[in-house]
Amino acid sequence: MRWAAEWNRRAFLKTAGLASLLNTALPGSVGAAAARAARGASNFFVPKVYRELGLRPFINAAGTYTTLSASLQPREVLAAMDEAGRAHVDIPELQAAVGKRIAGLLGCEAALVTAGAAAALTLGTAACVAGKDPKAIRQIPDLTGLKKTEVIIQKSHRYGYDHAVRNVGVKMLEVDTREELLAAASDRTAMMLFFNANDPRGRIRAEEFVALGKKLGVPTLNDAAADTPPPERLTMYTKMGFDLVAFSGGKGLRGPQCSGLLLGRKDLIEAAFLNGSPFSDSIGRGAKVGKEEIVGLLTALELFLKRKHAAEWAEWERRVKYIADTVTKAPGVTAEREVPEIANQVPHLAIRWDPSKVRLTNRQVALELREGNPRIELRPGSDREVTPPLLHVGVWMMQPGEHVMVARRLREVLEKGARG
Ligand SMILES: *Cc1c(COP(=O)(O)O)cnc(C)c1O
């Protein structure tokens, strides 16, 4: 088997001392740093379960992408989930207690642990459409005879995840301006949806959107799923006045991958809960969270709030600089640090090259890294060919030392491309 051969090669590299190999591959001070860090990278851990399934885990040089399994949970989170799994507990009681704790931590009225941010969008919408009315809860997504059936959204905020809102059966009304929004609002308006990462692209900015919701008496929901760090975002939007705010639990918070948070107004959070699991005849029953995820997310959140964010940021900067310094040794290659304005707002690296010097497309490089050993995944889309070639590297989900491996592989592949 091909994979088996690669594992053997990995085992060989480990015994042969990867650090010394790296030392000969990279001259000067880079070599010394590489050797130091490679001691970490050579510990690249392959869980038995994945090996037995014939899977090849990879170095995450991308970020918290769901398809790439998002983030790794800290030991403490796994331990808390393990402990939570050792006793039976009443789920509504657990949800209420954890919700109260989280609301206290984040200074909002109420909170609910959901099966992800997408689940939070569905439950939040259901809360605005069906409320706590048992008949309406059972009926949706059939909205026949219900009063609140429409959701208003800015055209520039339409996105794939609004499917999670449309699941409730609502009609989406698109607007561009404040005037259009006021004209679109009616007795039928259930909710106003805001996609936080697209705030800079909309004509109605967050604060004005909230003010319009208040003026109209319509609840506003902000999807800020991927927008931590910085940690302040966890409290910022409920304070700003959004009635509901959704976050992913499995992205920057590093909780269970299938967890999320819905924060906001007490009456709406209570209604959101009634529209989901454990209640069998509800729209959100398929988005179940178990005791382990509920406890896991609470633990992840507590850890996140205590984390030394500045030190973590400095480490990401160090990784970005190391990779930039290494890959730009290849002829015709440039590297630029980038921080997205919002969502995944952490240091990344954009790598470009002169295709007349390095005769490779970005797709070829991305595939070589994917197929190599260790397997490395760059940011999704890196395997889509663009001219001039461009690759994005995310460093924040790497394990200590892995940036050295990524730098080395990138340099190796680009230099080979330069030799032709
Ligand atoms: C990731 C993401 C979601 C979905 O989050 P899950 O926790 O995976 O359900 C929703 N909205 C946005 C903007 C996201 O980035």
Image (cartoon, grey):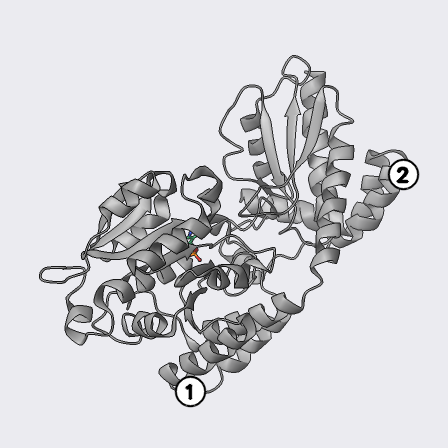
Dot 1: what SS? loop
Q: Amino acid at mark 1?
A: His
Residue shown at 67% from the left, 21% from the top:
417
Residue shown at 53% from the left, 60% from the top:
236
Query: What is the number of the mark on residue 219?
Result: none
Check the image and report above or below for 112 versus 332: below
Crowdedness near tag 1: few (<14), some (14–19) or many (≥20) residues, C-alpha within 10 Å:
few
Check the image and report above or below for 385 versus 5: above
CA separation in Å, label 1 and label 2: 56 Å
Q: Position of residue 126 (x, y in %)?
A: 27, 64
Crowdedness near tag 2: few (<14), some (14–19) or many (≥20) residues, C-alpha within 10 Å:
few
Query: What is the number of the mark on residue 88?
Result: 1
Rendering quarter of residue 333: top right
Query: What is the number of the mark on residue 29?
Result: 2
Residue shown at 63% from the left, 47% from the top:
346
The reply to whether residue 17 is visible in this rendering is no
Q: Position of residue 256 (x, y in %)?
A: 50, 65
